[in-house]
Amino acid sequence: MKGVIFNIVEEVIVAKLGPAAWDEMLSMTGLSGVYTSLGSYPDADLDTLLAACANLTAADPSALLQIIGEGSIPLLFDRYPQFFENALNARAFILSLNTIIHPEVRKLYAGAACPHFNFVEAENTITMGYNSPRRLCHLAHGFILGLATHYDETIAIDQPSCMHDGARMCHIKLTWQ
């Protein structure tokens, strides 16, 4: 996993819980916490950090991933405004993930292993198929919440199937209000 993800996780944790919480998580895990944005690190480090955060907060790791995803959007907008330039709304941004956003991510961060999405569109809904060996669908859910806030939209999110429950892939249904 690219270090930029760990950088954003740290920033969101510090913003929500304070710098002492991040330091405590590192102490609990034995991880150094030194992640360079271009570096690659074991996926297990994220799981370990989430478990430590869950220990500190008594929150479920999947809920923590949603909070991190939601809190990431303003940070991503500040760092990468070009990703948002051509997306006039959350729907356009989401539909550009495979064709614009993730190819740009791969240019910036060589070796980045981005998830793949497929989309089934209807008038006011998109059903996203999420497929990634990392199984971070809860992070994707949080990103969507953050995009809804960023674009001042209301999006109802339902996940009728999930890899964590044995499904082959996650399906996330988005309905614009």
Image (tube, grey):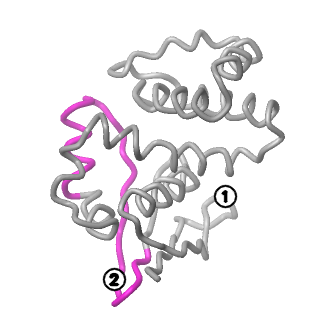
- Report helix, strand or loop for mark 2: strand
Residue 108 within the segment the image draws in magenta: yes
Point out residue 43 in the picture as x, y percentages from the top left corner. 54, 31
| Residue 129 is one of the magenta-drawn residues | no
**Front residue of 133 and 49:** 49
Q: CA distance from mark 2 to mark 1?
A: 24 Å
Residue found 43% across the figure and 63% down from its top = 148
The quarter of the picture where the N terminus appears is top left
Neighbourhood count class around disc 1 (C-alpha, 10 Å): few under 14, some 14–19, many 20 upward = few
Q: Earlier in the sequence, mark 2 or mark 1?
A: 2
The residue lying toward the viewer, choosing from 118 and 155, is 155
- Disc 1 marks a residue whose amino acid type is His
Q: Secondary structure at mark 1?
A: helix
List x then y, in percent, for residue 38.
32, 21
| Residue drawn at point x = 26 percent, y = 67 percent | 92
Residue 164: mark: 1
Q: Residue at x 33, y 35 (%)?
A: 112
Extreme residue toward the bottom, this view: 123
Vertical placement of residue 90 versus 30, above or below = below
Q: Answer few, some or many: residues within 10 Å of disc 2's Cα (few below 14, many 20 plus, some between 14 and 19).
A: few
Q: Could you tell me residue 82's position as x and y percent?
A: 18, 44
Q: Disc 2 residue type? A: Glu
In the image, residue 154 lies at what x, y percent? 47, 73
**Residue 121 disc label:** 2
Q: In the rendered view, would you say 14 is above or below 157?
A: above
Q: Is residue 18 left or right of residue 9?
A: right
* Residue range highlighted in magenta: 99-127
- Of the two numbered discs 2 and 1 in the rendering, the one whose residue sits closer to the viewer: 2
